[in-house]
Image (cartoon, helix red, strand yellow):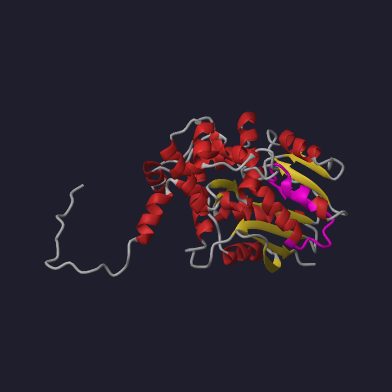
Amino acid sequence: MTTEPVVFPPILVPPPSDDHLIWEVWLSSQHFSVLTVTEELGLFPLLARSPATAEEVAHSLTLALSSTQALLGILTSLGFLAQHQKHFHLTEVSRTYLLPDSPYYYGPALHLFCKQPMAHETLRAVLQNRQTLTTFDEEVGNIADAMQAGDIPSARAEALTQVVYCYSLPAALAIAQSGNFVGVRRLLDVGGGSGCFCIALAQHYAEMSFCILELPSICPITQRYIAAYGLEHRIDTRAANMFLDAWPTGYDAVFFSNILHMWDRQHCLQLVRRSFEMLPPGGRIYLHEMLLNEAKDGPLTATDFSLLAFSMSLQGQQYSARELTDLLREAGFTLPDITATSTSYSLISALKPV
């Protein structure tokens, strides 16, 4: 590649905009590594036991003082720590998501994705459809292909389920609080993973029962999560490939969370049509996803997650509300309704006509 010579103007004038955005994006590349390394070093449990100064942190974790000060400064600027009288304290978000004994611990996701950074060459290969971001190891490769074929090895299924559970649980509780499931008696959760959405809904809607349709290697893991909450009598599992195998019948609602973004429109339409065929008249479908705006240029979390979905399968993407409601209408559903359930997620529901 040749580079054209730089032409310098005879007189320098101030640029029309400042370079803050460049600095912010450039240096933000460190943030995820700062978080994962800090979590691995055990800083958060250390500060949970007692707030500490930079000198005390450096001594306890056997780190250089100057680098410790820089690390603590970044974590404080990001909002994971707060400083008071030179002592660093955990903030509420760190206590909630970064302590191993918290039910909302994000550790499995941090441990997994720190091994697979979206490096420059990786991203370029993804964008040119030459390579997926291999999230587990070479045995799994393209996640969507593995899920579609139903051949995720048991150890990899365990890792996948743990990761999805830790970032889905807060959203599941938000759905139970904000989503409208009034009148639903029996719900089929397609690709329900750990079952956290059914677990949250079961605790909120005492009359509902559930079945989780999952791959054979995932169902035993799902059953452990269900048993941990004592809900075996209300939540069943069914081992099946959602594209190829028959779905159980007798349900008046079908639920998908973080499923459609792994697939292109054709595969999504197949799943929605299967839902329509299975449901009785008056049955409902629920789609839980991060929604892009209609221009697909925001919000930032959804655009970031959309690229991650594509990088894992070379066909995944986040969709806009209009794209998903059009999909539902094409399959025969009516009266789509959209509810924002949490900071990042929305729940779309629609009705099979009577």
Q: Is residue 193 left or right of residue 13?
A: right
Residue 73, percent from left and from top: 47, 48
Taking the spot 58% from the left edge, 67% from the top edge, the residue there is 322
Q: Quadrant of residue 269?
A: bottom right
For this orientation, the residue located farthest to the left is: 10
Query: As rendered, which of 271 and 321 lies closer to the eye?
Result: 321
Q: From the image, which quarter does the C terminus lie in?
A: bottom right
Q: Is residue 17 above or below residue 109?
A: below
Q: In the rendered view, does 54 fall on the left or right side of 259?
A: left
Front-most of residues 70 and 335 = 70
- Indicate yes or no whether the magenta region holds residue 191: yes
Between 77 and 117, the residue placed more toward the observer is 77
Question: Residue shown at 67%/57% (left/top)?
Answer: 287
| Percent position of residue 89, x then y | 59, 47
Q: Is residue 263 visible?
A: no
Q: Does 22 sit left or right of 14 as displayed?
A: right
Magenta region, residue range: 178-201
The image shows residue 169 at horizontal and vertical percentages of 69, 48
Magenta run includes residue 38: no
Q: Residue at x 11, y 67 (%)?
A: 10
Instruction: Name the outermost residue toward the front.
Output: 85
Task: Give the tally of numbered discs.
Answer: 0
State the image coordinates of residue 235 (x, y, percent, origin top left). Answer: 81, 44
Q: Is residue 215 above or below residue 83?
A: above
Q: Of residues 124 and 146, which is closer to you in this image?
A: 124
